[in-house]
Amino acid sequence: MQILSKAFGDYQTNCYIVKTDKAELIIDPGIGAFEWIKKEVSSPIAILNTHGHFDHVWDNQKTKERFNIPLYTPKADAFMLKDDIFGFNMPSSEPDFEVLEESFDIGDIKVKFWSFPGHTPGCSAIQIGDSLFSGDFIFKGSIGRVDFPYSSPEEMKKSLKKLLDFKEDLRVYPGHGPATTVFKEKNSLRSWLKYLD
């Protein structure tokens, strides 16, 4: 499996392309990601959103229509793809699948959506193999903000505790900034948990 990444827009939001020998998955096509995606993919089979914020979903519909592929979005964030809650004239998109915490195959690729609400109601991390695409749930040394509309510090605390219980040291590819691992972040997560208390 090969992972390509590039940051886009004013918020330097990471878009990821996960490549196997047969296909590609596109994760979080944000503002301006479409042109890069077009150059990098040959057999895309789906788009996956970690959550519904504009900087992660901006090029959803454009990418979906260009390649005629389905869009998977966390169920609790599906409304954000239409509502433009920040008022940035975000292009609306329509998920084909509204995902809960569940595992499934897309083509020959096994995908697991982990539900980690707090930053948004449906905020999720997507596990593919030993890689975890964490969106804006956690970053290297930090966590997602909980002062936005529909954010919840209480839900974030539950989500941090859930990740702290992980026994597998997955590689973490966040929505902003560099990659890290689950185990490397555990001390930071404990500090953030105390801060939220």
Image (cartoon, grey):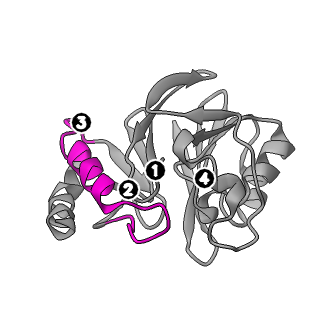
Name the image quarter holding residue 192: bottom left
Q: Which mark's residue is nearer the viewer, 1 or 4?
A: 1
Circles 3, 4 touching at the beta carbon (< 8 Å)? no
Left or right of residue 96, residue 19 in this image: left
Q: Earlier in the sequence, mark 2 or mark 1?
A: 2
Circles 2, 1 touching at the beta carbon (< 8 Å)? yes
Q: Amino acid at mark 4?
A: Asp
Magenta run includes residue 144: yes
Q: Which mark's residue is nearer the viewer, 4 or 2?
A: 2
Could you tell me how far apart the alpha carbons at marks 1 and 4 are, in whole angstroms?
A: 12 Å
Q: Which mark's residue is nearer the viewer, 3 or 4?
A: 4
User: Mark on residue 118?
Assistant: 2
Per the image, the residue denoted by label 1 is 123
Residue 57, percent from left and from top: 65, 56
Q: Earlier in the sequence, mark 3 or mark 2?
A: 2
Residue 149, percent from left and from top: 50, 67
Q: Amino acid at mark 2?
A: Gly
Could you tell me how far apart the alpha carbons at marks 2 and 1 are, in whole angstroms?
A: 7 Å
Q: Earlier in the sequence, mark 1 or mark 3?
A: 1
The residue drawn where x is 28% and y is 67% is 141
Secondary structure beneath label 2: loop
Circles 4, 2 touching at the beta carbon (< 8 Å)? no
Secondary structure beneath label 1: loop
Q: How many numbered marks, from 0 up?
A: 4
Per the image, the residue denoted by label 3 is 168
Left or right of residue 102, residue 142 in this image: left
Residue 163, percent from left and from top: 26, 45
